[in-house]
Image: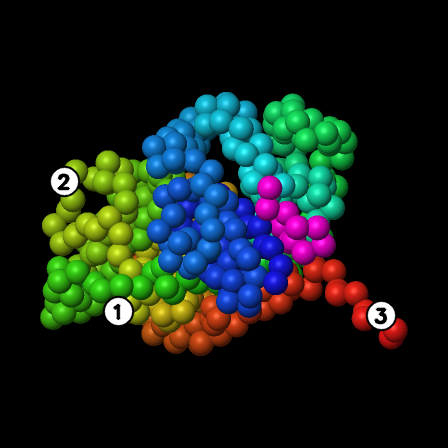
Amino acid sequence: MATMLLSTHGTNGDVLSFVRLGAALAERGHDVTIATHARYAPTVRAADIELVPIDTEDEYVRYLADARDMLDARVGSARLPDLLGHYQRNDLFGQLRREVEAAVARHRAGATVLVGRHTSGLATLIAAELLGAPSVWVAMTPAQQLLLPVQVHLHRSTLAAGIDAVRADFGLAPVDDWAAWMSGADRQLGLWPRWFDKAGPTVEAVEPVGFLLNDAAESGDLPPEVERILADPSGPPVLVAASSGQMLWEPFYAAALYACRRVGRPVILVSPHLDALPDPLPAGVTWFPRLPYRDLVPRVAAVIHHGGIGTLGRCLAAGVPQVVLAHSFDQPDTGARLQRCGVARFLPSTRWAPETAAELLTEVLTDARYAERSRRFGATVDPTTTATRAAERIEALLAPPPEPAGR
């Protein structure tokens, strides 16, 4: 049995897949710990994994709101985001230090692998360097690796002093080559399949293992009100799946809800952030803070979403067409890949015109080829196989046991 120390940050798409990976490693007999947001404590503990909380619920809410405000301040501007201010306001350098301390406390020489989320998993790199343990970075989407040169520039020009101060606390020298250091994990895995990789610029440094959905965390009984909507004689509803973070802004909802009204379908709107939604909601729209997507998505006609990797994977697994209103970061690249595969239409945020969104939703609902292709690609989505494949690649970094004496 080895010690597997996982670290991830963000929202559902970033955390739930890591919990599923941790569960797969635990099922294979390893001692698994995951450092992540306290909000996900019930999900982590249900998977029988030790949690190292990196924040409190209130701190997490402030972190999401601050990230949204940081991005909103850039709308219409060529300025880079105030990443240093974001780190300072949310004590992310202190969080980085505490994550490294947790790894040091749990490390077993020769029997530990450190696994971090791509880009944000700096504690994984620092701890691996400090302890001499093997490390893995796990990318959620191809764009995370494709955008690495941008991240290298931001870290070198903005965050270097804070990160180097944390390194100094553990007796490590400052980073002298940021590009090499941020590419320095012993293995890089990608949570998408090879066909998705080939639908856009390929990522040579990352090994795709498949979409990793967390069925256990996304299953449950649907509320009676949802069952009533699903049974509506006018036909299956459209699901508008907002981000589990606070990154989406008013034009997303304006375009998505207008498109649904134009096609005459009832709408199930899922968002944990009621304050971000139109008030009042249009007729025919029913809001829920969260729903079990594994049970809901196969029963809707189409899904409009922001391009998150967890949501698109769930749509593919269900064989349901998608309209992606891609907001930022990796989402435009993700939406473009889905469109090239013929399972979705996508719009970048600069083109979120309600009329255009309505045209795209009409297209994916009326052209049966979108559903056919979605089912064909969806048949390849196998979270259990993906989890096993990823676990095996992580285990392969463990030092082999010594040969018995006399052999």
SS class, disc 3: loop
**Region of the chain picked out in magenta, as a range:** 105-114
In front of the other: label 3 or label 1? 3
Residue highlighted by disc 3 = 405
Q: Between residues 149 and 64, which one lies in front from this camera angle?
A: 64
Q: Which image quarter holds the N terminus?
A: bottom right
Q: Is residue 141 above or below residue 374?
A: above
N-terminal of the pair, mark 3 or mark 1, is 1
What percent of the width, then of the height, locates residue 123?
A: 60, 40
N-terminal of the pair, mark 2 or mark 3, is 2
SS class, disc 1: helix
Between the C-alphas of marks 2 and 3, the distance is: 75 Å
Q: Is residue 183 above or below residue 227?
A: above
User: Residue 257 has which mark?
Assistant: none
Relative side of 360 to 286, left or right: right
**Residue 364 in magenta stretch:** no
What percent of the width, then of the height, locates residue 116?
A: 58, 48
User: Residue 299 has which mark?
Assistant: 1
Q: Between residues 128 and 379, which one lies in front from this camera angle?
A: 128
Is there a contact, CB below 8 Å, between mark 2 and mark 1? no
**Residue 111 in magenta stretch:** yes
Q: Residues within 10 Å of mark 2 (few under 14, many from 20)?
A: few
Question: Which residue is at a point 45% across and 41% down the rendered structure image?
Answer: 53
Q: Identify the image quadrant of residue 227.
A: bottom left
In front of the other: label 2 or label 3? 3
What percent of the width, then of the height, locates residue 243?
A: 36, 47
User: Residue 280 has which mark?
Assistant: 2
Question: Which residue is at a point 40% across and 50% down the rendered structure image?
Answer: 12
In front of the other: label 2 or label 1? 1
